[in-house]
Every structure is written in structure tokens, then in C-alpha cells.
Image: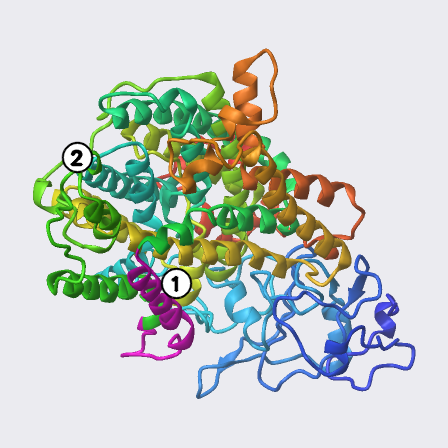
Amino acid sequence: MASSDPSKRPRPGQWPPAPDSTAMAPSSWAKRTGFHPKFSGETNARDSGQITSIPPVQPKPKEPDPNLDLEAGRPKPSPTKPPVPTSNGEPVVVKPPADKEKEQTPPVRKRRDSDGGRNLGANGQPAAAGEGSRRALRDEEVAAPIDVLPQAVVDDDGFVSRHSHMKYELRDTPGLVPIGLYGFQHYLSMLGSLILIPLVIVPAMGGTYEDTANVVSTVLFVSGLTTLLHTSFGSRLPLIQGPSFVYLAPALAIINSSEFLGLNGNTFKHIMKELQGAIIIGSAFQAFLGYSGLMALLLRLINPVVVAPTVAAVGLSFYSYGFPRVGACLEIGVVQILLVVMFSLYLRKISVLGHRVFLIYAVPLGLAITWAAAFLLTQAGAYSYKGCDVNVPASNIISNHCRKHVSRMKQCRVDTSHALRSSPWFRFPYPLQWGTPVFHWKMALVMCVVSVISSVDSVGSYHASSLLVASRPPTPGVLSRGIGLEGVSSILAGLWGTGTGSTTLTENVHTIAVTKMGSRRAVELGACVLIVLSLIGKVGGFIASIPQVMVAALLCFMWAMLTALGLSNLRYSEAGSSRNVIIVGLSLFSSLSIPAYFQQYGISPNTNLSVPSYFQPYMAASHGPIHTKFSGLNYVLNTLLSLHMVIAFLVAIILDNTVPGSRQERGVYVWSEPETARREPAVSKDYELPLRVSKVFRWVKWVGL
């Protein structure tokens, strides 16, 4: 281990190091060959928990030292001359004489935590030379007595030069037109996450095309409203709130409960009211979890090794629905998948007018092209069969010829939906539009557990997005405040009747990284546009008319993306550690295998089930292996243990918090310290509540800075 005596440390620029410095040998093939992975978290440290001094690096001329540490703080600025910009805009830091440098700048000790031992920028990510100080203190006053690195070029408003990889950061307001364009782009790129869930659950509840159109409009309205609330009074990060895939599996489990299978009449409204009651109670529990400060305590147990398999299991859990639905019309569904994959992977680097349109708009472009091709095939008569009418109910079809082809006609034709024609031009979504919610404790208890999983998902999204757009990660108090407001948002979703809870969309982090747009104002303006669109009934009708095969094909891509985004949280830990590999592997395998046991228990090959095969995994509540004298307890346990994400979360959180491992190896999330955040104007402006609301809640320390 290197000597901790500051007098024996090599000065910046001194190379080779002093004789007493111990060089660390390469620890892997990757290090021996000079390969530096971005996400593996590999480190040269022989003890992953040790605290080592920063190795001496030959600094580039005319660039500030980028080495920062969120936990250890920043070294105090030395009284040097202010930096002056060069012709290319890069700041030049005038360094003190060598003999005084040792006295004025104490050696910075750096903890090797979540980045695998690489140099940290102000946001916790690896920083290239010259980027750390440009990004670290973008809004701090130079004269403020704050522990900061020497400032870069500062304008009248206290801003330093923008981080090179983002076009617009959190508080940037470039103008109405750019904000409008980027806000529309942001929401359009997330079209699949916003609209696909209603297209799955409403038909499963027995709803008509008109019901689907109304629920889609309601989802757009609630998503816009809750996004405005979150960017104003939640975490204040540019995160879109919407229907989460976390709530989809428990919603399908409730929809396919045995007590709803024999319903007659309008089953949609009856099941929707049951869902509303469960979502409202589960969301109230989530709001209590956030605003009471319990979330700040739970944060000690939630690390990347827990978040990664939990979120990944959400995407993997829908494998039984994805391609089986695509197979109903292969020539349409497979083309849809191939187009989205081609746009998002093979054509992702092609720019048009400075925008990577194929990567940003992969989902809407793929949908538009496939829809157009299906329309042409329908008009050409490819799916027309003599004497067969797709509008005739299957029970009334007598001809075997028509019985054979009716399913293919319904899945492949694009003119089977009447949602667009029957939708009104104006419709205002209002609370309790489906009736008074019905509350059952067994369904509500399932949603309470799911709300905890939703909070775990949001923790990873908060951390990852803050590294992209904010000066520092949020404090535990800000995170608790965000989780509390997500609970309030889900209560609103339950009152309006969206069918699922409202939470931070995990895909938002990927969208921010791709579009390089992190402006809070752009997201807020896009939310206002979303509310306006929700009032136009034809918009909901148009979305509801998307053929089910295309919906399933898009979901295959979205769930794969969700799985990848979940596993990407491992970049904050040592992904190559045997400890983490085993924990993540066990969590993922258990999340698939244990629920399969509950889902298949009591079902024989000859069992006559009245639901489609792709919904059978969500019927475990009626035939699961747990049988006690309390039917409600049987329902809760059989349902929860048949949900993939619940098993992944339980296995991961138990193993990660009981198996020994250093902070670096576990990749413990780095959150900002409250006292440090209050002293730094940049952090305060990023997360402080607007309109002096923060002064009212200042006494509530666990939900503020």
C-alpha cells in the first residue's frame, strides 16, 4: 500500500514516482493487455476495500486536475490567479510554485468505491482530463467559502462551461423553440413506454376498443400531470412519470384471479375498480415510505447488486407474453422486431441534421413502417378469405374454413379496430370515471409489496440520471422526497383509473443519454403537450388502433431494453467479482425458476383453462402450492411468490447484505451529504424545492437537502 505520509508523496508531474511507492501489478488479462473496460468496475487494488492515494499522473498542460471525490470532499482552492481562457475556450489554471504547492494543496485521498478505482468526476463518473472542474461547480460563486477545486471560467451567472457530453443540463433554458423541440423528441422517443401497457391490460380485462382509447388518453393525462409534480416537488430531476412495467405483472395477476373468470356483463369496469382500490392503498404505503424517512433507512440495503437483478427480472418476466403473441402473425411481428433492432443497433450512428434519428426514434419509426406495410397488405387482400367476416363473433362462425383463418385475420389486418372512428374529438379524463374503487386487503397487500419494488427501481434511475445532468447525486432526503411524491402520483393514477401505478420510467435514463437532453424545462413543456394531447379523443383512438401483434413486437424490444438497463447498474460495482457474479446469477435464476414452480403447480397437460396460454403464468393465486385455512393469505403468498421481480429482490437483498464484501466491491451508491449539499449553491439549485416551499418543510430533514 502506498505511503500515507504527505511529505513522501510524489508531487504532481513527478514521474517516475518516489522509490518507496509500490507499483501495483496487473490483476487480470484485461489489465495486462492495456484494455480499460467502461462498465466492468475492474480495479488494480489488491484489497477492494482499501483507501489509496491518487497515483501520480502526468497532468496535461493548461488543464485543471480532474480528480474529485464525492465522499472525501474537495480540496480548498489555493489563492492563485484566476484562470484565463485560451483561444479554444479551455481554462488555464495558473499553478503555484512547486515549493508552495505541497503546503497549500493537501494530498487528496480517494476511496475506490463505485467506479472501480478510476478517477471520479464531480458526478461520480470517470472524468477525462479537464472535464472534472468544468462540470463540478457549474453554479457556485467564486468568492463563496466552499471546499471546491479551482474554478474554471465563470460567467456573470456563475456558470462554467457545459459538460461536453450533454447538450442541455438540468437547469438550462435555451429558449422556447429548442425546449419545445427537445421536449417533444424526449417524449416521442419514449412512446412505447407510455402507451403499450394500456394496450395489454384493457383487452385482458374484457374492455372494448373504446375502453382502450379512453384508458390511453387517461394515461397520457396522468403522466403529464405527475411529471410536472415530480419535476417541481419531487426529486426535480428530468424524469418522466408514467405507467411502469413493474405494476404490469401484479395487475395481470389480479385481472386473472379466479373470482373474475365467471363474470358476466361489463367485466372491464368491475375489474378496473378492483385494480384502482389495490393501487391506491399500495401507493399510500409508498408515500408513507418516502415522507416518513423510512426510505432513507432502506437505502442502506439497496445497492447496484440489488437493483440490477430486480429490474432485469421485470423485463424477463414477460417472456411468455412476448413472442407467443408475435407468432400470431409472424410476417408482421418479426419485421417489426427486426426494424427496431436495425434502427437502434446497426444504424444508430447515422446522423441527420446532427441528430441520430434512427437511434432516438427507433420505436416510432419501426412502428410507422410496419403499420404502413400491414395496411398495404390488408388493402391488397392478403388477409381476406372468401366468405369470412372478421367482425362476426367466433362463436357464430359455422364454416371450418373461416374458423381456421379468423384468428389470423384479426391479428394481421389493420382495419379490425374501430377505436379511431368511434372516439370523440374532445374528452376530458376525470377521476373515478369508471366508478368508485373497490378495496380488498389481499390485493392491496400485493400492491404494497410491489410499491417497494417500484421504489428500488426508482433509486437506480435517480442515481444514474443525476450523474448525467446534475452537479451531484441527490441527498437521501431528496430521494425520499421523490419516492414519497411517486406514491402520491400513483394515488392519482389509481383515482383516474390508468390500471397501473405511476412511477419513474426506467427507460428515461437511456433516453437522456441518447438525446443528450437533460433540461428540466424541456420535460415540463413536453408534459404540458402530453396533457393537451390527452384531451383530444382521436389521439387515444389512434393509439388504441395499433394491431396487437405490433404491440407485442414492440414489447419484446422494450422488455429486452428494460432487462439491459437493469443489468447496467452493475457498472457501479465490481461486475467481475465472484461475489457479485454469484449473487446476480442466483437472483436471476431464482426469479425464473421459483415462480415457474408456483405458476405450473397443479396444472396438468389436460387441464382446461379458460384463459389464453400467455396469461396462464398469472393465475398462480388460484392453484398455487400454498394451501392454508386462510384463503386471503393463500392468495397473497401464491401471487407474490409467482412474481419474478419479488423473488429476484428478496434473493438479492438478502445475499448482498449478508455476504461480506467491501464498499467498492458491492458498488455502494454514492449519495450527496446533506451538509455539503446545503453549502454548495449548485446542488441547492438543482434539488431545492421552488416557490420557497423548501422553507416550509425545512424542519422535515429527511425529505429535503
Give the residue drawn at x 84%, y 69%: 6
Q: Position of residue 203 (x, y in %)?
A: 28, 38
Q: Is residue 324 above or below residue 179?
A: above
| Residue 5 or residue 627, whichever sits in front | 627
Say the numbered circle drawn on residue 396. Answer: 2
| Residue 86 or residue 144, whichever sits in front | 86
Q: Position of residue 332 (x, y in %)?
A: 28, 61
Describe residue 87's horizontal placement relative to residue 10 as left or right: left
Q: Is residue 352 above or below residue 418?
A: below
Give the residue drawn at x 59%, y 45%: 592
Residue 634 figure quarter: top right
Kind of residue indicated by mark 2: Asn
Q: Position of residue 700 (x, y in %)?
A: 52, 30
Query: Is residue 253 shown to the viewer in this render?
Result: yes
Q: Is residue 352 magenta?
A: yes
Kind of residue indicated by mark 1: Asp
Q: Residues within 10 Å of mark 1 (few under 14, many from 20)?
A: few
Q: Is residue 206 magenta?
A: no
Q: Is residue 315 above or below residue 367?
A: above
Q: Secondary structure at mark 1?
A: loop
Which residue is identified by label 1? 157
Q: Is residue 264 above or below residue 93?
A: above
| Residue 429 or residue 669, whichever sits in front | 429
Span of residues in magenta: 329-357
Give the dominant element type of the magenta stretch: helix, strand or loop: helix
Describe residue 428's horizontal placement relative to residue 53 as left or right: left
Q: Secondary structure at mark 2?
A: helix
Foreground tag (2 vs 1)? 2
Q: Which quarter of the image is occupied by the N terminus?
A: bottom right
Q: Give the mark nearer the N terminus: 2 vs 1.
A: 1
Query: Is residue 520 shown to the viewer in this render?
Result: no
Count of number-bearing discs: 2
